Amino acid sequence: MRVLIVGAGGVGTAITRIAARRPFFEAMVVADYDLARAEAAVAALGGDDRFRAERVDASEEAAVAALLERHACDVLVNATDPRFVMPLFQAARTADATYVDMAMSLSRPHAERPYEDCGVKLGDAQFEQAADWAKAGALALVGMGVEPGLSDVFARHAADELFDEIEEIGVRDGANLTVDGYDFAPSFSIWTTIEECLNPPVVYEADRGWFTTEPFSEPEVFDFPEGIGPVECVNVEHEEVLLVPRWVDARRVTFKYGLGEEFIGTLKTLRLLGLDRAEPVTVPSAAGPVEVSPRDVVAACLPDPATLGERMHGKTCAGTWVRGVKDGKPREVYLYHVVDNQWSMAEYGSQAVVWQTAVNPVVALELLATGAWSGAGVLGPEAFPARPFLDLLTAYGSPWGMREQ
């Protein structure tokens, strides 16, 4: 297997550090718009000659396809933010490469009823091309991070081994992370955080299909394991709700994120001021008027999440709560994966949230390389058997857990 990673930020760099310990691939090219960042990711690996750095603009489909072909890469891993999903997705198809991402193509709210009906859903642009990928015998493995990703694997595992009937699948994410020296320092890309938290959340119900609610709706307190404890969680737009019902039979699917009142208040203020906008606005500068995205300005004013590890303390938990029936009796479980920032920093030099995101595509790549996973079309993680993934994740030294509720 020869892999091209596009994006050498926190997650892309963590992918290289995890993959460097595994023998399943022949080469891994790390490409970024900022060549120095790609070179730094490679240099940190101590001379592993399977890795090399390149410069590429993720928005330039032809350039990415040419890079895949020049290095004879048969897999493209998208470690950029969701703005670049479609050019990278198309580049992989052009170069006849397998495509893997951790976030799917962007949504667009319904013009008249944004908090009732779906407009363009997450992943719609990719699923529109599913037949073409399948016909070509090519694979796009979409949503293969932690959430979406491992959470979807948990949903498939629950359906295969733990339940006869599933009433509800609810992804629940929470943490007790703190960052020294910052009152507001998101542990993941603020660009992506704004996108998913301020868009209308999507809910799935079998008798209604997909529909939307208002941001931060249906608050509930969820008790997270391994000392994290109770965290208030709210509905957030997320890929699992669009992926799970395609392959797993459940009457209801939701995603709720533990944000906290202060974080929600900050996001609401950004929206109130128009600073959540991705579209450029014209602003004066010493060199004359320039166009800049308000959301990019917010991101530039905040610390890079990849650099926060030394200041960060606590644990992050990603998991899937499932309620249904097994052997004629009600059952309720929480399948989860917890990463302690102290451990991930000591072991890999990566903060917990980016490491937890990065380990899952590496596990998936190894399963594809060995043939334990295979398929064609545009497929989510729940389209594949869960047990090989969960066993290999444990073999990577990062076991998962299950709690009977």
Image: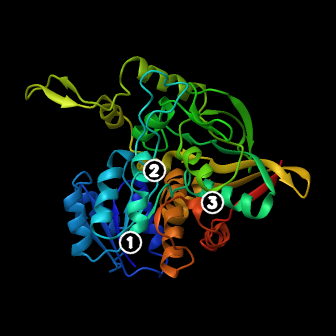
In the image: residue 327, left or right of residue 197: right
Can you say whether 302 is above or below 217 in the image? below
Q: Residue tagged by mark 2?
A: 103
SS category of the residue bearing label 1: loop
Q: In the rendering, at what x and y percent does residue 33 appear? A: 24, 54
Q: In the rendering, at what x and y percent does residue 275 appear? A: 36, 25
Q: Are marks 2 and 1 in contact (CB under 8 Å)?
A: no
Mark 1: few, some, or many residues within 10 Å (few <14, many ≥20)? some
Amino acid type, mark 1: Leu
Residue drawn where x is 56% and y is 55% of the image: 146
Q: Are marks 1 and 3 in contact (CB under 8 Å)?
A: no
Residue 281 occupies quadrant: top left
Report, in whole angstroms, how far the alpha carbon at label 3 lies from the one at label 2: 15 Å
Amino acid type, mark 3: Val
Can you say whether 37 is above or below 235 in the image? below
SS category of the residue bearing label 3: helix
Amino acid type, mark 2: Ala
Q: In this orientation, which residue lies closer to the viewer: 273 or 196?
A: 196
Q: In the rendering, at what x and y percent does residue 171 appear? A: 65, 45
Mark 3: few, some, or many residues within 10 Å (few <14, many ≥20)? many
Residue drawn where x is 53% and y is 51% of the image: 353
Residue 106 occupies quadrant: top left
Which mark is on residue 153? 3
* Quarter of the rendering occupied by the N terminus: bottom left
Residue drawn where x is 73% and y is 58% of the image: 159
Q: In the rendering, at what x and y percent does residue 346 appear? A: 54, 62
User: Which of the marked residues, 3 or 2, is nearer the chain's N terminus?
Assistant: 2
Q: Residue tagged by mark 1?
A: 45
Mark 2: few, some, or many residues within 10 Å (few <14, many ≥20)? many
